[in-house]
Amino acid sequence: MDRPGTSRPVCSNAAADSVHGSAQHASSQAPLHEREVELEEKMHQLLKGNINEIYRCARYFCPSKQDAEDLAHEVCVRLLTTQPSLPTSIDKVKAYLRQCVKNAAISSGRIARSRSNKAESPIPEGDSSKLFGVDDRMEHVASRMDLRVAIRELDVEDQMLIYLRYYVGLSIKKAAREATGLTGGKAFRRHQAVLDRLRELLAEEAD
């Protein structure tokens, strides 16, 4: 990526020479360097427009703000370097970026998984009533424990499912499909199993 205040040539000598020939020919034979610059700029704009989505997901998985910032930076640099082909749908782009963050968090070992690590919360504040509905007992138990710490005990896929369902706001169907690849009845059963596991963890803390 170029440093602020600097510019890169948008055209090579070969491309400049071709301007004197056929404009159509020049367009079809655009230099590789020019295309790379164009792709890099498109990726830069895409990342700029979705940086909050990237950081928010990184913050969910990471134990500290610094880890989240580092992880978000790594994801952006990797995407700018590799220039992958991205979906055209905005929702699919966001889903792709979240998967990049999750995979990078796993490979870098930054995911907060231990209950003993309470230095900083890895995820946003959550409303336990969104997880447990009108179950007054569980809402009371949840109020006595940091729900965010319980979520760390889940498998990474299940953590992602909770994030997508209750912090991003996707439907159960969409959240389960993105997080686990499950569809139909399996998606709903997985979601219910995750809530049941959270109930168990909260109950254990309350005892």
Image (cartoon, rainbow, N blue to C red):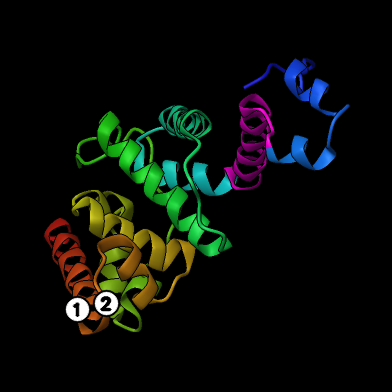
Q: Is residue 83 magenta?
A: no
Please determine whether, in this image, residue 64 is positioned above or below residue 154.
above
Can you give x and y, in whole percent of width and height, for residue 147 in the image?
Answer: 31, 57
User: Which of the labelled discs sits on residue 186, or is there none?
Assistant: 1
Q: Residues within 10 Å of mark 1 (few under 14, many from 20)?
A: some
At x 38%, y 59%, the residue is 163
Q: What secondary structure is marked by label 2? A: loop
Q: Is residue 43 above or below residue 183?
A: above
Label 1 SS: helix
* Residue at the front extreme, as displayed: 21
The residue lying at 46 percent from left, 48 percent from top is 97
Residue 32 within the magenta-colored segment of the rendering: yes
Determine the image quadrant of residue 175: bottom left
Report which residue position mark 2 lands on.
183
Q: Nearer the viewer, residue 69 or 104?
A: 104
The dominant secondary structure in magenta is helix
94 shown above or below 41? below
Q: Amino acid at mark 1?
A: Lys
Image location of residue 161, percent across then percent down: 31, 63
Cβ atoms under marks 2 and 1 closer than 8 Å: yes
Is 66 situated left or right of 185 in this image?
A: right
Highlighted range, magenta: 29-51
- Residue 179, quarter of picture: bottom left
- Can I make out residue 48 in this image? yes
Quadrant location of the N terminus in the rendered image? top right
Residue 79: image location, x then y, percent: 48, 35
Is residue 122 among what the camera can see?
Answer: no
Q: Nearer the viewer, residue 14 or 69?
A: 14
Residue found 64% across the figure and 24% down from its top: 33
Q: Position of residue 152 (x, y in %)?
A: 24, 48
3D distance between C-alphas at marks 2 and 1? 6 Å
Which amino acid does the dot numbered 2 rest on? Thr
